[in-house]
Image (spheres, helix red, strand yellow):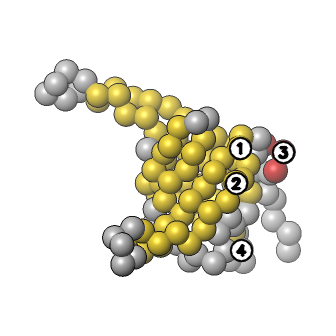
Amino acid sequence: MKYVKLVPDSVCRIPIHVKLHGEGLSEKGEPFTLFEADLMCNYQDGAKTVMTEQKKLVEISAKAYFNGDIAPDMAVISGGEVKVFGARRHVLRGIKARNPDGTVNYTCLELI
């Protein structure tokens, strides 16, 4: 059965550089890079103001949506970094949204 693409290629128009890390650290204390590529995504960002003791803090968060599975060799996406619009963001969480047959419909990276 063929499933509808919830994030089709036609809406993925923002260039993004993605670097995803694996669990653990190398001998130099750096994270292992398991996936690195220049891709196109659907990018949605926002900001919120959090009140702190120092008056306030602006927290920027974003989501990058990709058609299909961007890293099929990785079972889960737990961390990494991206560069989009000239800014570096850290991957807070990666989601592989699956179809009922187990294939990945789209990938979402939650960024901070």
Q: Given the image, on which type of amino acid does mark 2 rest?
A: Asp
Residue 1: horizontal and vertical position, in percent? 85, 74
Q: Given the image, on which type of amino acid does mark 3 rest?
A: Ser
Task: Residue at 42%, 68% (x, y): give it.
Answer: 31
Structural crowding at the residue carrying mark 1, measured as other residues with C-alpha within 10 Å and reported as few (<14), some (14–19) or many (≥20) = some
Q: For residue 15, which numbered disc appears in the image?
A: 1
In the rendered image, the vertical position of residue 62 relative to residue 54, given as above or below? below
Residue 63: horizontal and vertical position, in percent? 56, 45
Structural crowding at the residue carrying mark 4, measured as other residues with C-alpha within 10 Å and reported as few (<14), some (14–19) or many (≥20) = few
Circle 3 SS class: helix
**Pointer 2: what residue?**
38
Structural crowding at the residue carrying mark 3, measured as other residues with C-alpha within 10 Å and reported as few (<14), some (14–19) or many (≥20) = few
* Residue 39 can be seen, yes or no: yes
Task: Residue at 36%, 72% (x, y): give it.
Answer: 28
Label 4 or label 2, whichever lies nearer to me, is: 2
The number of numbered discs placed on residues in the rendered structure image is 4
44 left or right of 93 in image: right
Ranked by sequence position, the earlier of labels 2 and 1 is 1
Ranked by sequence position, the earlier of labels 4 and 1 is 1
* Residue 44 can be seen, yes or no: no
Real-space Cα separation, disc 4 to disc 1, in angstroms? 25 Å
